[in-house]
Image (spheres, rainbow, N blue to C red):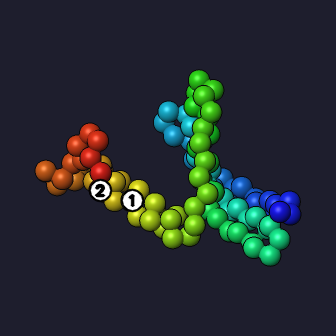
Amino acid sequence: MAAAEHDRSPVRAVDSLVTACGRKITVHGLRLSPAGRPIRRIALDVGRDQGGEPGVWAALTTDEARDLAHLLLAQADLTEPGTAPGSSVQPGAQV
């Protein structure tokens, strides 16, 4: 297999955020160019926590990235203060 060429888009301020618990979450395009089979993914990198514990990352297809965005927005809607009574998310519940 040929060596993969990594081509990342430059990270801009809007490509990442730092959570209340101190983890930096970065989203960027990832392109791998193995011989004859280019691969494009959206990379999601959840960095180290405040204690220095390693983070995690995932490489998502465009459809997976859209599905994740939909799930995040649905949970945000359910968790938003002022949502209708009875529509709050119970611990461990999934949408």
Asked if disc 1 and disc 2 are in contact, CB closer than 8 Å, the reply is: yes
The residue under label 1 is which amino acid type?
Answer: Leu
Identity of the residue drawn at 34% across and 59% down = 74
Q: Residue furthest front?
A: 1
Q: Residue 6: x and y, percent?
A: 80, 59
Spot occupied by residue 38 in the image (x, y as percentages of width and height): 75, 72
Label for residue 95?
A: 2
Above or below — where is 33 with respect to 45?
Answer: below
Left or right: 94 in relation to 26: left
Q: Secondary structure at mark 2?
A: loop
In the displayed image of the protein, which residue is found farthest to the bottom? 36
Q: Secondary structure under badge 1?
A: helix
Q: Residue furthest left?
A: 86
Q: Residues within 10 Å of mark 2 (few under 14, many from 20)?
A: few
Q: Which mark is residue 71?
A: 1
Q: Residue at x 21, y 48 (%)?
A: 88
* Res 15 quadrant in image: bottom right
In space, the residues marked 1 and 2 are separated at their CA atoms by 7 Å
- Quarter of the C terminus within the rendering: bottom left
Horizontally, residue 35 falls left or right of residue 80, namely right
State which tag comes first along the sequence, 1 or 2.
Answer: 1
Q: Nearer the viewer, residue 57 or 69?
A: 57
Q: Residue at x 70, y 62 (%)?
A: 30
The amino acid marked with disc number 2 is Val
Mark 1, residues whose alpha carbon is within 10 Å: few (<14), some, or many (≥20)? some
Question: Which x, y percent locates residue 53?
Answer: 60, 28
76 left or right of 44 in image: left
* Picture quarter with the N terminus: bottom right
Residue 5 shows up from this direction: no
